[in-house]
Image (cartoon, rainbow, N blue to C red):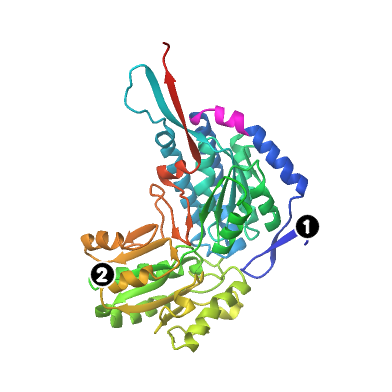
Amino acid sequence: MSDRFQTRSPVDGSVYVEREYARAEDLDTTLARAREALGPWRRRGLAERRALLERMVEAVVDRSEELALELTWQMGRPLRSAPGELRGFEERARCMLALASEALAPIRPGPKQGFTREIRREPLGVVLVLAPWNYPWLTSVNGIVPALAAGNVVLLKHSEQTPLVAERYIEAAQAAGLPPGVFQYLHLTHAQVATAVADPRVDHVLFTGSVEGGRAVHRAAADRFIACGLELGGKDPAYVRADAPFEETVAALVDGAFFNSGQSCCAVERIYVHRDLYERFVPAFVEKTNELVLGDPTDPRTTLGPVVRASNAAAIMDPVDAAIAAGATAHIDPAYPGSERGPQYLGPQVLTEVDHSMKIMREETFGPVVGIVPVGSDDEAVRLMNDSPYGLTSSVWTRDLEAAWALGERVETGTWFLNRCDVLDPELAWVGVKDSGRGCTLSRIGYEHLTRPKSFHLRHAF
């Protein structure tokens, strides 16, 4: 294997970044430095840690324009929407810092004569964060900032598609004055990641990526008693009831299916529409989809950028072609305007006459494709929504709040939405069920997964 890697931009296929992988001795030195930094960092106290992290966030925000352009060139997000990721980074970071005092406060049971008792939340130690390319700032901040706030130290390994994000994080940390060893990064091979996960100096792993990637992390940690937070794939469904607010629902679901070219674990990939609306919904959805502008993501007019690689485009099209061969109807011309720019410039696709015997309705597509199915009742919609190995987010579109609550109790999902989708509230727990992963990030609950409880049971003098 080469000791170097290249990041090819989906914009034009050029080499945008070239870096060396870390050497074995680099990993050893980095983990040793992290262990050395852990004690002093956790003893600094929350107020001081928060102040340093707030300065780190400011250092990132101050470079937002530059970092948004880098993001576009690394993974293809249209420049008109790339700054939104940096705004989301700031929102999540500031929210988690604001929640830290309450989340990390000692728990004190009621008084007991002759005793002082409390439960403290202590840091786990060295946290290894393995971050993906599709939302490289948003996915990584979920773990990095609260882990550091809780008194852990962090080693970040970012995707080879977005290596500059890791480097910019550390530049911001250095500008903010974080002590050496508290927050570090390395560019690692898959084999080196497995070595790091198995290393006894790593106390916790946060991985965001594919189900197979999650299984690899789980295997690497199998001989150790450490937790692994795994945010994995999705095949997220939406149910459009007969009383849905029609125009708003169509527009929001087009965005939920095709934003970031569908390259999101919580993108809408399945839509179940009540039969009373189905004949009206499909042409309206197709019409709105055809308004997307596929093209150069550095052009401010572009609303749909390329997928990250030509190989990804081919993998996305395989289940689409199989579904069409099995009788599905494709509603969008495959020669979508802009697709002539190259194979990674994949136009959107809307499929009907699909069912759950097809891979397109069962397996994560991670691309600009959605299937639409008519249903006759709430019960049928719930059955189909739950007929999936995934459970990250699900949504219902209706004017009936009571129905939304009732349906949400029946759908197997980590987040249940009413009249919105493909969004994240940092004050709520971000969590999946089934093959969408385990563990939790964000909200006060997220801190519970980055700390361990320690009980103090003190009997006063005899």
Q: Amino acid at mark 1?
A: Asp
Name the residue beneath numbered marker 2.
Answer: 244
Which badge, 2 or 1, is on the more N-terminal residue? 1
Across and down, in percent, residue 193 comes to 66, 53
Q: Is residue 364 left or right of residue 254?
A: right
Q: Quadrant of residue 74?
A: bottom right
Q: Quadrant of the C terminus?
A: top left
Helix, strand or loop for disc 1: loop
User: Quick one: label 1, few (<14), some, or many (20+) residues within 10 Å?
Assistant: few
> On screen, 105 above or below 436?
above
The magenta stretch is 38-46
Name the residue beneath numbered marker 1.
Answer: 3
Across and down, in percent, residue 48 comes to 52, 29
Across and down, in percent, residue 155 comes to 63, 45
> On screen, 51 above or below 460?
below
Residue 40 colored in magenta in the image: yes
Helix, strand or loop for disc 2: loop
Q: Amino acid at mark 2?
A: Ala
